[in-house]
Every structure is written in C-alpha cells, then in structure tokens.
Image (cartoon, rainbow, N blue to C red):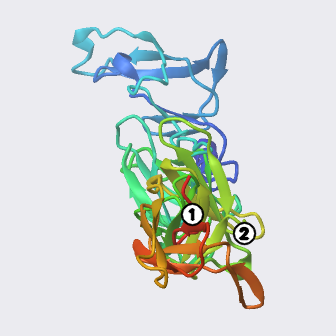
Amino acid sequence: MKKIIYLFLFTVMLLSGSKSYSQKLYIVRHSMGSCVNECAALQSYFFMSGNTYIAPVAEFGDYHVFNLPPTYVELISIADTSFGCAWRDPMACYEQSTIDMNNCFWGITNAVLPEPNVNTNLFCDKKTLTAISCPGPYRFSWEYSTNGINFTPMNITTTPNQSFEFVKANYPALNDYTGTIIFRVLIDSDPNAPDENVYSNVVTYYIIPCSPTLAATSDPNLTTCSYSNGSVTFTFSRPLETAKGEKLLLNRVPVGNGNPSSATSNDSEVEKISALSYKWKNIPPGNYNFKFQTQFGNGTPSTPSTVTTFEIKQNTALTFWATAIQPECSGNLGFIEIHATGGTSPYYYILDDQTEVVNGQTVPKKIGFSGYHQIPITTDGGHKVIVVDNSDCIEK
C-alpha cells in the first residue's frame, strides 16, 4: 500500500508540474458501474485501448487519467457474504462497458482550448477566450506565457464553455509587449478532490500593436472634374509613430464588384494633410468598402480595422457660353458676355491666351468671376476666351 501511495503522489506531481503540457490526456469519469453495490464489492477492473491493457497515469476517486484513448473498461465484483447480504445470495458480476470519449457521460479530454486560425490569432489589447468541454464539475484556471516555458497564473477560473475577456492592460508584465502569447488552463475535474489537476492543450496567439482608430471620413467627396477622379480624407485618432517607421496601409474595394486597390502613407497618391489626417487621391467615382492598418519599420503589423464605407461622387460638368456684344457707337467698347455653371466655383477666364509671371513662372493670366461677367474688348477682330473653374477644369 505504501508503494501505491508513493506512485500516486509522484503521478500527480508529474501532471501538475511537467512542462509536457501539450500531451493529450483523457479524463474518464467512471463510478464502477452496476457491478458495485451494497452487497457486491469490486474485486478487480482494467481498462483497454483497443486490444491493449492500459493503466491510468493518475487516479482520483472516480476520475482516471490516461495518455492513450481508452475504448472500454472491464469490472469484476465479488459477493459480500456478511450479515444482511448473505440471505440475498448476491452474485459476483462481470461487466464490460464501451468508452466513448465523444460522449459526455464518460468525461473529457484535456484538449479544451480551440485552436485559433490566421484570422483570429491576432489581437492588440484584448481577446475573448473560452475553454470548451462537456458540462460537468470541471473548473479551468487560466495561465499565460510569452516563451512557452514559464507560465503566469491569471487568477481567472471559468466553467465549461464560459467565456471571459483577456485584457492585456491588466497584466503589467505585458506593458508595451508585442509577440507570441500562449494560453493554457489547469483542469480541475472535481473541486472536492485534492491534487487531481491536469494541464490542457496550449493555444498560441500573437499580440500586435493597436492601429489608430478612424475618427472621421470626409463627406461629400467630389471628383476634381466631371471627367477626372477624386479624393477622400481620413482623420485618425493618433499620429503615426514615425520614429518606429510606422506607416498606414490603406485598402479599398468597390462595393458590389471590382478589384481592390491599396496604398501606403509613403506613396505619392496619399497626401499628409496634418499629423492626424491623410488624403487618398486619384480615386474613380463610386462607393467603396475601406479598411486599414499600420505597419512598423521592422515589419510588425498592427490590428486591422473593421470595414467602413465612403463615396466619391462625380462632380457636375463645367458649362459656359459666351456672347459678343457689339459697341453702340464707334467710340464705345464692345464686350464678351460669359456665363458659367457647374464645376467648382469661383470661375476664371483667360482672354486671348494672355500670360503673366508669377513667382518667376510664366502662367496663363486668369481673371476670376462669379458666374456672369462682361469682358471689355478694346480691339476689333476675333477673340478667344477660355473658362476654367477653381480646379482648372474645362468644359468637355
């Protein structure tokens, strides 16, 4: 008996303290079936995995822990001939029960943490975690590690299928940490039994920096000209950490159908308006799904944003017309009367391709007007008038 007790205690220490936490274990809950009652005592029992006898690596009352999947258990009882039972003539019993670890009646495996996928294994500030198992008395005590060797208890215990939110800020050791984070739970099969805990499987996530949030999107957004593309301005919650090489990664997809387009804050088509605002230029008219994230100089990405939408509307076309007004007398001036609508006011006209020098550059001489104007004409003959709007759009 002393030897058995010694081996039992050694097994508990192995399961609770070993770093081989990724080993799959099978926790079988078995009360010895109908062979055991008030007049029949258990004589012997054994478990099988296929055609192989297997011994539990640990036993805790009705709980047996195996490192191979048990397939059935066999029980043999012996009759109790003491007073009160002898007159009943109890019979010895042999019982074989098939074990189905997919059936909650038998228990659970220690693989209670679902594996994340490439779409769910990244987070920056918090993550919802759940230990999934059959209902039962099980309790799951959570731990985390950044190296897979040293685990830190989180002082959080959940029941089967109970979710909780892991909040990075609650753990000072993770302040400013980015990289691998590994979770596991210590499974307590029976809160009333001491020292029968085993570790679960482990799951790996990655803590990455948080992207800034999108504070505002410009609206309305018009194309520069009726025949050209437009732009949209995004305002974010914080400036980029340029000292760490952080840049914006922008992505848009036409709603309904179309090819995605991408740009970064380092590209020429993305103009920095302020520390918080960036204008994405040269976008065709349409409705777009938009998302973003940032990336640091060492290649570390931040969390991707949720999808928002924006619209680029086609600007109204610039239209103008001109009418010659002849002088009433030979000494009077004539005029060219011009009207302009559409486009983006104010409007400008250029008469007879006149130029001027501005900052050392020769440019067309543009004279502004509000939409209606009479241009005085001092010389006879034909004259040329060009009208443009505030974005230098012309009539098409």
Give the residue pinned by disc 2.
266
In the displayed structure, does residue 392 sit left or right of residue 288? right
- Locate residue 329, reporting x and y percent: 43, 79
Which quadrant, please, contains the N terminus?
top right
How far apart are the alpha carbons under marks 2 and 1? 28 Å
The label nearer to you, 2 versus 1, is: 1
Check contact, mark 2 vs mark 1: CB within 8 A.
no
Depth order, front residue of 123/36: 123
Can residue 92 be seen by looking at this rendering? Answer: yes
- Vertical position of residue 51 compared to residue 268: above or below: above
Q: Residue furthest front?
A: 330
Give the residue pinned by disc 1.
393
Identity of the amino acid at label 1? Cys
Identity of the amino acid at label 2? Asn
Q: Which mark is residue 359?
A: none
- Vertical position of residue 183 compared to residue 116: above or below: below
